[in-house]
Amino acid sequence: MNDQPSRRPRTQGKSGPQGKSGKPYRRPQKDPVRFLAFEALRAVDERDAYANLVLPPLLRKAREKEGPEQFDARDAAFATELVYGTLRRQGTYDAIVAACIDRPLREVDPPVLDVLNLGVHQLLGTRIPSHAAVSASVELARVVLGDGRAKFVNAVLRKVARDDLDGWLEKVAPPYDEDPEDHLAVVHSHPRWVVSALWDSLGGGRAGIEDLLEADNERPEVTLVARPGRSTADELLDSLDADSVLPGRWSPYAVRLSEGGEPGSLEPVREGRAGVQDEGSQLVAIALANAPLEGRDEKWLDGCAGPGGKAAMLAGLAAERGAVLLAAEKQPHRARLVSQALAGNPGPYQVVAADGTRPPWQPGTFDRVLMDVPCTGLGALRRRPEARWRRRPEDLEGFAPLQRGLLRTALESVRVGGVVGYATCSPHLAETRAVVDDVLKQWGAAELVDARALMPGVPALGDGPDVQLWPHVHGTDAMYLAVIRRTG
Ligand SMILES: C[S@@+](CC[C@H](N)C(=O)[O-])C[C@H]1O[C@@H](n2cnc3c(N)ncnc32)[C@H](O)[C@@H]1O
């Protein structure tokens, strides 16, 4: 349940000509917040847009159109909560709507379903009083769907309003004892195959997986990184508003923003001295930089660098030791983002647009290599509310050859005795251990380093030698890291 203050729709009774019922016809009034939320959901559904990319321009447009007094920061926060909350809880809300209608859900037009789910979220996921949630949703339906379909919305939401979320979950989720995965899928709003995959990787009983799924439904804290050589966490803590910043939990470079806000507008971020970066991602870069190495330590490679979060950190750490980072990225536009992230690095670095499966550099060139490979992103579901509904199990087959190819490149690119970090922001075993096991079986002359020792003070990293971070345990994305030393 979120803590948004209750909001009444901004409807004003404006009378017009008489309607069919004999009542005077009242033109529907557009509530800019709910209208914006609807537009965002439509863009996500119709154009496969990402909510985090679609929202900022819509918010800007609403502020310009309505004026800053009519559409203020609270309105923006409320609209964001409506969009993110509705998308995250879509699985649960679909099940509840399905129980309130007498036809299959797939026969309901997507725009109608969006209005319904927005309404269900206000009824069951916020503190907005039921009558206000229903009337605001019906008003929205009148604006975007027309009066006929608004009646359907009204009828469905009135049924939904008869119970609270717990009551509905008892009715629509199969009992845990009969089908644990289906139960968790409905209660915690994840596709069943995702529940299954996360549970396989996490292991353990019901409590752990429930905590993980719930953590995926929470808004993540915004974490900054003090870029090594350009600022320190203490400097950031001193320079930012003391009431809204906290030190990182694990990374000595991290600062947490307790109030979210717009981190891009903070001076240290604008000047490139700091960046926005999950602490798990920071830990991966630090671990690779600290892996023990005998002999030369001068040339580092980030083979999948875009958009440049880990590369910026590695470049700073490399500069502190007099080493140089080569940041490679296949997509030219993402390579440009890497260049932006690295601009101002205190030491030398290079950025190239290159396909890591056909590398332009000589084999055995590097002392340290990071391969943070493309993956399903199932470890970052908290950040991308729509991602869980878009991903398909078949995606794993698409990534499998690329992930293996890139890890092989990493082993070829590092010198004998050098270290490779293989990382994913997915905990799916098919993208983590299966890739490492397969490639090492073929490669032979390589050994796993105990990566847990490279994250000192971080608890519950698994049985090793690889590490798996978890949102519900560490407060980070579910990043995976295996550290491998090439022995021949
Ligand atoms: C998980 S992201 C890396 C995130 C990055 N390390 C960071 O911390 O900002 C994977 C990146 O690999 C890039 N990529 C995909 N295929 C590639 C290939 N064959 N060679 C190099 N980069 C590739 C993608 O474009 C994407 O930017």
Image (spheres, rainbow, N blue to C red):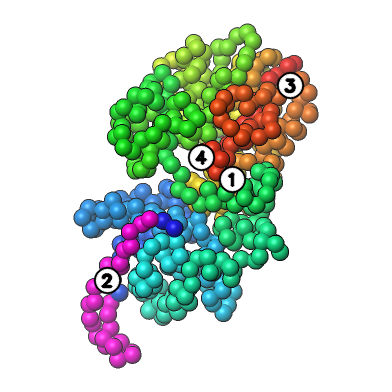
Which quadrant holds residue 343? top left
Q: Who's the residue at 71% across and 64% down the image?
A: 178
Q: CA distance from mark 4 to mark 3?
A: 32 Å
Q: Look at the numbered disc 2 and give the secondary structure of its residue.
A: loop
Q: CA distance from mark 3 to mark 1?
A: 28 Å
Image quarter of the C terminus: top right
* Range of residues picked out in magenta: 3-27
N-terminal of the two: label 2 or label 3? Answer: 2
Q: Could you say where residue 298 lies in the image, as x and y percent from the top left?
A: 55, 12
Q: Look at the numbered disc 1 and give the secondary structure of its residue.
A: helix
Q: Is residue 179 above or below residue 364?
A: below
Ligand 1 within 8 Å of disc 2? The answer is no
Q: CA distance from mark 2 to mark 3?
A: 67 Å
User: In the rendered image, which residue does mark 4 sit on?
Assistant: 475
Tell me if residue 10 is in the magenta stretch. yes
Query: Circle 4: is it few (<14), some (14-19), or many (20+) Cα within 10 Å?
Result: some
Q: Amino acid at mark 3?
A: Ala
User: In the rendered image, which residue does mark 1 sit on?
Assistant: 378
User: In the rendered image, which residue does mark 2 sit on?
Assistant: 11
N-terminal of the two: label 2 or label 4? Answer: 2
Residue 446 numbered mark, or none: 3
Q: Could you say where residue 44 lies in the image, as x and y percent from the top left?
A: 47, 56
Q: Residue furthest bottom?
A: 22
N-terminal of the two: label 3 or label 1? Answer: 1
Q: Amino acid at mark 2?
A: Thr
Along the viewing direction, whichever of 245 and 55 lies nearer the viewer: 245
N-terminal of the two: label 4 or label 1? Answer: 1
Q: Who's the residue at 37% across and 24% down the image?
A: 234
Q: CA distance from mark 2 to mark 1?
A: 41 Å
